[in-house]
Image (spheres, rainbow, N blue to C red):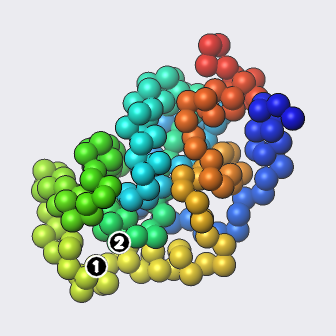
Amino acid sequence: MNKSLMIFALIFSCQLTAFEKLSDAYLVQYGNSQAELRIVQYFSFTCPHCVALFRKQFQQIKEDYIETGKVSWVFHPVPMDLLTVQGMDCLSKLSEREKKIFLEAILEELFIDQPKLSLQLMQKGMEVLGKPIKELQEKAYLAETAAFHDSFHFLKQDQIIEALPSVDVNGKFLSAQVPDIDFIEELLRTTGRSHEN
């Protein structure tokens, strides 16, 4: 089976995994939610593949697909690590515009192998946005946040995301799929809307 047919079969036959998504408070949304391709990228702040994809391709994806109305994109955190829960607490305190600024700055400068430095980066980002969280590194503070409780609820579901990055395309869940430019191009060709059109 060629790549186009395989992607087409996956998208149109795969059923959405039965899990409840996180609240919009933690999601970062780009583009028109009515776009033909609606992509949700499941990520964490400690996933090297997620960070690499963002650094290498997201700016081009944004310019070529999101800003042209072909694709909408949602970053959905998967709170399997402390840094992602801390990032969720930050995101929950920001406006839609501020969430994009925060996410882009953090993913661009993140130290994947140094979570303490990454946490300091998040705290600095919140200070710059005028919403400092000095106690973000304190476990007692974090344990009382909605982000912590929502993370616990998300992870205790019967069905959870086990591989990152994974994606949801138009309501169909694809595990362990990297939503790079080639993947988007193939989806657009499969659905009849090539990037060249």
136 left or right of 56?
A: left
Mark 1 sits on what residue?
Answer: 142
Label 2 secondary element: helix
Residue type at tag 2: Leu
- Residue 92 makes an appearance in the image: no
Identify the residue position indicated by label 2 in the image.
82
Q: Is residue 4 above or below residue 21?
A: above
User: Which quadrant of the figure contains the C terminus?
Assistant: top right
Local crowd size for mark 1, using a 10 Å CA cut-off: few (<14), some (14–19), many (≥20)? some
Q: Residue at x 56, y 30 (%)?
A: 181
- Residue 4 shows up from this direction: yes
Q: Quadrant of residue 138?
A: bottom left
Q: Nearer the viewer, mark 2 or mark 1?
A: 2
Mark 2 or 1, nearer chain start: 2
Q: Are marks 2 and 1 in contact (CB under 8 Å)?
A: yes
Q: Is residue 6 left or right of residue 43?
A: right
**Looking at the image, how many numbered discs can be counted on the residues?**
2
Amino acid at circle 1: Leu
